[in-house]
Image: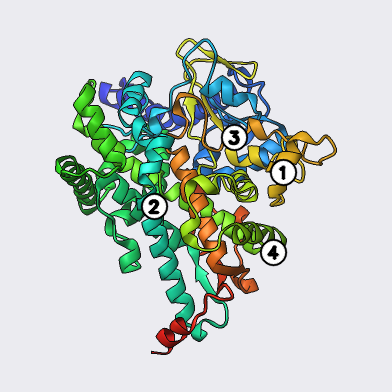
Amino acid sequence: MSSPTPSTTLAPMAGVESSWFIMWTFSFPMIWLVLTIIYNLYFHPLAGVPGPRSWGALRLRYVWALVSGTIVHDFEKLHHRYGPVVRVAPSELSFTTPDAWTDILQPGRTPPLPKDGRWSIPGLKAQGIVNIVDLDLHGRVRRLIAPAFTTSALRGQEPILQQYITLLMDRLRDLVTTENNGTDGVEIDVVPWFNFVTFDMLGDLAFGESFDCLHTSRYHSWIELLTNTPKAGAFAAAALFYPLFASALKYLIPASLKNKVLDHVRVVSEKVERRLNLESTRSDIMSHVIKQIESDGLEGLTMDHVNATFMVLTIAGSETVATTLCGIVNYLAQNPSKLSILTHEIRSHFSNPHEMTLERLKGMLYLNAVIDEGLRLCPPVPWLPPRVAANGGSVVCGIPLPGRTAVSILTYAMGRDPNNFHDHLSFVPERYLPEAKTDPQSPFFNDRRHSYHPFSLGPRICIGLHLGMAQMRLILARLVWEFDLKPPTEHRKTQWEKLRTFILVEKNEIFVNFKLKEGLWTTEMKSSASS
């Protein structure tokens, strides 16, 4: 009997080894996934923090909510179920407790937690003030532009604001008077109009030239790209949680889109350069920046930082204000009793629009209460992009966090938390009136008003806070002085709670019925409309 040849004995062995290799290759990812889930659920330092297992096991649920635009509402539901601190991903927590503001953004002895770099705008040579991670660099950029956003600077900028708000009223009046001769109400989508006026104002203040949205009644092409940036940023941040996918994504982005982004970055640079070289004595944002550069230089910054900052300011200082205005007007139209109080306050104090100065409007108690209540229910940034714990770990609200743990504050849910506000889902500006804060018999006496910060807190508090409040005061006062507002027909009503969020709120259409105030429909207007 002959013995087997080497070839016949090695062939089966080679086949077995090959099978084992293939099986191991395909099994390893599954084994790794199972072990990761077990670790995240039972052995991770955050395993004891309340939250759903499906969110704590892997980041898939988080990423899906992020790219679907439902993350704010999903987080809110989780907080209602699990409490003020929720584990929303293996290494990320969300907070709705007021203490989170100081622990994350304004700690007493240590620097505030830095921003998570994954939320920076991709493709820029330098990040702007909103997205800069490095605290020292952020401080230098802020010192450069801060003089342009003081209350004294705002007084010099007021004529520019008044100019565009008057133009907005003219455009809205044109819409009302061209339909039904202005005698009946006209349903107007306020979203584009509030965007038009805020972008035009920021364009003029920042670059010395408007985007001409109000003149043309349409968006500038650059503005269209900027308004899509938050959604693109959400998708980019989601991809960065998976490095292989992020690497592949670079090759999937069409060259035409990359070129479009580069073109718009170039447009910003050109606008900034033109304004820097423009000899002008007027007071605007750039005039103060020029004085700072002439006085102290760029303080270690580059023009790329300046350009990126003005690009970010254009959207952060306009779209956010437009969002809150949309929310406020939507709530006012659907709450006639509150609208009636505001209308009476403005019309009884002013006989014509020229009397509405920023100084006088600051004293309108109900107007300011309406804005504060609008900021509570419709915060301009419903969800603060995450900060990260220090490499050696941090403590937030008494919870020890391992290094690089992401933490975020859900502004939207905090403003609607029944533990923070009485009658928390209702639009009730009265909670911000002086008597509600001083009268123990008021149902709103125990509201945590001073623990709610829609403009953020600490070194990164919104630099345009005073400008944003000024814009809202002027626009709302002029609106209720010149128009009678009513809710639209039922099928056109907007429920704010159903709007999606990609860092900023995605607004499609928000209709409000506009009718000229009695007495404004003059003979001149009638003849103009009929001709």
- Residue that mark 4 sits on: 336
The mark closer to the camera, 3 or 2, is 2
Callout 2: few (<14), some (14-19), or many (20+) C-alpha neighbours within 10 Å?
many
Alpha carbon distance from label 1 to label 2: 29 Å
In what quadrant of the picture does the C terminus appear? bottom left
Mark 4 in CB contact with mark 2 (< 8 angstroms): no
Question: As displayed, is residue 423 above or below residue 303?
Answer: below
Residue 343 x %, y %: 63, 61
Mark 3 in CB contact with mark 2 (< 8 angstroms): no
- Residue that mark 2 sits on: 161
Residue 463 x %, y %: 42, 34
Question: As displayed, is residue 248 above or below residue 220?
Answer: above
Indicate the secondary structure of the residue bearing disc 1: helix
Mark found first going from the N terminus, 1 or 3 = 3
Mark 3 in CB contact with mark 4 (< 8 angstroms): no
Question: As displayed, is residue 240 above or below residue 177?
Answer: above
Mark found first going from the N terminus, 3 or 4 = 3
Mark found first going from the N terminus, 1 or 2 = 2
Residue at position x 47%, y 30% from top? 461
Count the labels in the image.
4
Callout 3: few (<14), some (14-19), or many (20+) C-alpha neighbours within 10 Å?
some
Which labelled disc corresponds to residue 431?
1
Q: Amino acid at mark 4?
A: Pro
Indicate the secondary structure of the residue bearing disc 3: helix
Indicate the secondary structure of the residue bearing disc 4: helix
Q: Quadrant of residue 400?
A: top right
- Residue that mark 3 sits on: 55
Q: Is residue 125 left or right of residue 367?
A: left
Q: Nearer the viewer, residue 264 or 377?
A: 377
Q: Quadrant of residue 155?
A: top left
Q: Is residue 45 visible?
A: yes
